[in-house]
Amino acid sequence: MSAQTPPTLLKLARQALLRDETVDMSALDKLPMELLPALFKEALTGRHTMTVKAMVAAWPFPCLPVGALMKTPDLETLQAVLAGVDMQLQRKIHSRRRKLQVLDLRKKHHEFWSIWAGAEEGDCSAEDPDEQQVVKVLPRYALRWLLKVVADLWLRPCFHEEHIETLELMISWDMLKLSQVAPFLGRMRNLRKFFLTNTVKNVFIIGNRTTDQEEKCIRKFISQFYKLDCLQYLSMNGIYFLRDHLHLVLGCLMAPLETLSITSCNLSQSDLNSLSECPKLFQLKHLDMKRVGLTSLDLRPLQILLENVADTLQSLDLKACWISDSHLTMLIPALSKCSQLANVSFYDNYFSMHNLRKLLQHTANLSKMNVEQYPAPLECYDELGYISTERFTQLCAEEIDRLRAIRQPKCISFATLICSRCGERSIYDQELRLCVCQQR
């Protein structure tokens, strides 16, 4: 007759709690935190829905990765989880331990459960590294008591699209699949922030479909912007189909944008022209066009846009647009009128010392300027394109001294192009910080 290992006291305690479906939040608040993760796993696996609901309502950790425990779809259990979230958010007397900020519904392994499995055996302290990470990344949720929900996207009718205010869509699809998402986007009437990011390079593949079919899909997706009455923040990163279609996107805007971010893509001249022709951009506070190649384009439309937003623009990012002296000369008068401008970045552009100095002189009246990032002057490079550290240091120090004669810069830096060997850049911001190659 073989002897069986007796259950631990913790296991016996969990079993007793699971037999009592009337357990309430006040009782759970008194339990040691180390007991809760394992108890929750058993309650979820055993479909003790009342206990699941009570535990979510009293959850003391900032993250609940419940999707990792749900191997198969279970509507009843999911409803219990969501009911517990509602109870937690609506509690008038806040538990001192209530911290839930992120509900993760993705069906993927989460380190949280591994850490607390170790804690149950005494191998881990009660302070959870996952807790530290979420608190640091999401302090605003703790202050405003909002809940971030992370889930894999499975679009079906009637999933309450009208309640979605922020949508981050990371795509690796062709336009046919994206056009299938279009109707759901159009029903998000209260959408305020829309982030659209391409996660795969060179995905503009027509395959067996014709160019006309591709164009039809593009227009179907873009047309949904007509229905987004509340949109204020639009970010499009690496979107390959944006070229020659930006005028359609801007033409569909129904409300003035506060933030426009178009990054890591190629624009045509007609796309750039549309920036100066769209009245919904004339109240912009933030304009981000980093890594958009502008070197071969006429920048007069961008100049006109800057003039139109001179009273509202607070940040401008033209990093790695590869613009030159002639472009800068055209933009300087408009930039000098942007009275609210606080943050600018011109890293990775080609400015001579003469024109860079001109730009800085024209910012004399910009009293709200806070963060300034400028490229190293062309004179800092030798004929082979290598940086002269002595020249770089000298010119930047001189320029900061000149600037201090007309205003007091708060956070100003000059940077070289990214080094092709080490992937870093040298930066001068009151002192010189060299890339790895230059340090050798």
Image (cartoon, helix red, strand yellow):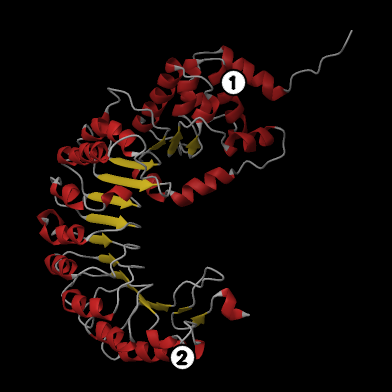
Residue 309's place in the image compared with 137, above or below, is below
- Compared to residue 90, the image places residue 170 above or below, namely below
Q: Which amino acid, mark 2?
A: Arg
Residue 24 at what x, y percent from top left? 47, 21
Label 1 vs 2, first from the N-terminus: 1
Specify the quadrant that holds the C terminus: bottom right
Quadrant of the image occupied by residue 37: top right
Residue at the spot of label 1? 42
Q: Mark 2 points at which residue?
A: 391
Quarter of the figure that contains the N terminus: top right
Determine whether, in the image, residue 416 is placed left or right of residue 400.
Answer: right
Front residue of 70/220: it is: 220
Quarter of the image where one finds residue 300 = bottom left
Q: What element carries label 2?
A: helix
Percent coordinates x, y for residue 224 in the rendering: 19, 37
Residue at figure coordinates x 20%, y 45% from the top left? 231
